[in-house]
Image (spheres, rainbow, N blue to C red):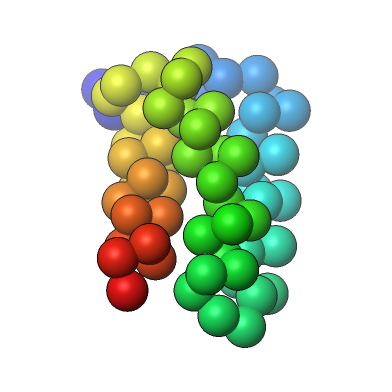
Amino acid sequence: MAEAASSRFPEPYLVAARRMLLLAREATDNEVRAQRLAPLAQQISDSWPHDSTLGMEILTYVQGLRSS
């Protein structure tokens, strides 16, 4: 069921999410990674379905970066 939630998004949303994740991976420290992912985390919190597996994984990752 959660996998279906991610597929409800138009392709441009998923492409943008992947692009932000790739930019974050290129960063050399966690603070920069968290900054680069902040807009995506905000978008996920505000408008993605709450049962989105991808959204939950991204939010968990960003929270981990912020606490490290």
Q: How many marks?
A: 0
**Is 34 on the left or on the right of 64, as rendered?**
right
Q: Residue at x 62, y 83 (%)?
A: 28
Quarter where residue 40 is shown: top right
Q: Residue furthest bottom?
A: 28
Q: Residue at x 37, y 45 (%)?
A: 59
Above or below, 45 against 60 in this view is above
Q: Quadrant of the C terminus?
A: bottom left
Q: Position of residue 14 (x, y in %)?
A: 63, 35
Q: Residue at x 59, y 57 (%)?
A: 35
Give residue 54's position: percent from left, percent from top. Answer: 41, 40
Which residue lies at the image location 52% right of the left edge and 60% below the top edge?
34
Residue 58 located left or right of residue 68: right
Is there any visible trace of residue 27 in the rendered image? yes
Q: Locate the N terminus and report the quarter of the image it occupies.
A: top left
* Residue 3 in view, yes or no: no
Residue 34 vs residue 67: left or right?
Answer: right
Left or right, 68 with respect to 58, comes to left
* 45, 1: nearer the viewer: 45
Q: Is residue 31 above or below residue 35?
A: below
